[in-house]
Amino acid sequence: MNAIPDELLLDILAHLEARHLQLLGACSKALYAFTRFDELWKTLTVEEKPAHVKQQWRGTWRRTYLQLPEEKTARFSVPHLYSDVLYRPYFCSQVDVCQFMKHNANTIARLPNMTLDEFHQQWTNTPFILTEPVSQWPAYEKQWDLKMLAEEYPEVEFRAECVDWPMKTYLQYTENNVDESPVYLFDRDFERKTKLKEEYILPVVFTEDYFAVLGNERPDHRWLIAGPQSSGSTFHKDPNSTSAWNAVLTGKKYWIMFPPDQLPPGVYVSEDQAEVTSPVSLAEWLTGFHREARREAGCLEGICEAGEIIHVPSQWWHLVINLTPSVALTGNFIAKNNLRKALRFMRDMPDQVSGFRKVEDPYALFVKRMEQEHPIELKNALEEMDREDEAKRKKVEAKASSGWTALTENTGGFSFGFGGDDEALEDEE
């Protein structure tokens, strides 16, 4: 085994079936340690979807897959096995995320409430937290937490990243897991599955939404989100250049944001911006890059408490992490001042448009509906896009022209030969 890197060994093990992992794990203590790597068993669970997993969570993916009670789990001491690959997930799962919020954790503006005019004039492209509107929601007054959701909807299945579990099983998971990145409940059909639709009213600043012209053909835009401490989302931008609101019903969330043109430390983006690469877990990013991020001029951060709602502007980078077990509602929308951004994204990056169901050309459909319901706003946005395109074209042409001029005006000229002029003179002499 010494000849095989740990990463390669885990890649090989990832191709094995459960019974082969068990057999291989019986060969030596070292192989037992590697075959117990819980991500292997999580992958098996997600791919095979065994029915019993939905009924009872047993603390780890391995024990849950094998229906193995904790008291019957074999335990061995392997004192001379050193592996960063095995240790890193364990280390990250033990990180206390609250320690990173002790200083300067509230630089995002906090306001009681806001009018739509104020939003248009000053706040469309700026993060902020409103402290009053959510406290008046019935959903907040009822204090919906994970236990209450499990009591009210025990057998109702909700989407939690890669699995669909009854709420009672997800509650078991949140109360007893050792995952580096806890599975985050993110369900788009909660209004159909629960009564929560009747228990919240959006603040007026978030009611303006041009995607509403699409009716039932609009992309997914409302979600119930919930999870244990340390769960959340790594750095990303919201889909289709939309803005977002996020209202906390119970618990508290930490947010850190960067403007659209400022890449957060530790985050790398492909040339077409389709792929975003960052540390595996939130804890890994916090331990490796949080201090550096806070020193960046454009960095904003804030803690959104229960009964508060945060605004995430279009195209802003953001990371969010639950400081306590939390339940929240979130939604995406297109505000008037950001219509141009959404149109440009849908037109220029059609392969990255997401959330639509059975719509072949989302951009064409959106433009058609906007022409019917908001023709003036559409005309203004398209004209602004044309001006931006023309300015970009001229800039590219000017850059190309200046480069050619610099090349042709080079007084040194261009010499095609194996030696310089001095070398040629010496040969003649």
Image (cartoon, rainbow, N blue to C red):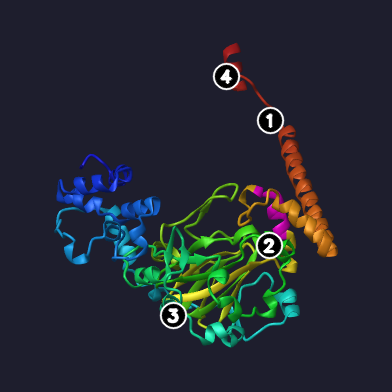
Which labelled disc corresponds to residue 313? none
The Cα–Cα distance between marks 4 and 3, rounded to whole angstroms, is 82 Å
**Residue type, label 3:** Met
The Cα–Cα distance between marks 2 and 3, rounded to whole angstroms, is 30 Å
Depth-wise, is mark 3 or mark 1 nearer the camera?
3
Which residue does the image show at 55% across and 48% down from the upper left? 270
Q: Residue under circle 4?
A: 418
The Cα–Cα distance between marks 2 and 1, rounded to whole angstroms, is 67 Å
First-in-chain label (4 vs 1): 1
**Residue type, label 4:** Phe
First-in-chain label (4 vs 3): 3
Residue 162 quadrant: bottom left
Dot 4 and dot 3 residues touching (CB under 8 Å) = no
Which labelled disc corresponds to residue 216? 2
Q: Please identify the dominant SS of the magenta region.
A: helix
Which residue does the image show at 79% across and 51% down from the upper left? 391
Residue 346 is a magenta residue: yes
Residue 118 is a magenta residue: no
The residue segment tinted magenta is 341-350
Secondary structure under the numbered disc 2 in the rendered image = helix
Total labels drawn: 4
Dot 2 and dot 3 residues touching (CB under 8 Å) = no
For the question of whether residue 89 can be seen, the reply is: yes
**Residue type, label 2:** Asn
Secondary structure under the numbered disc 1 in the rendered image = loop
Which residue does the image show at 77% across and 46% down from the upper left? 393
Which image quarter is the C terminus in? top right
Secondary structure under the numbered disc 4 in the rendered image = loop
First-in-chain label (2 vs 4): 2
Residue 331 quadrant: bottom right
The Cα–Cα distance between marks 2 and 4, rounded to whole angstroms, is 71 Å
Q: Residue under circle 3?
A: 148
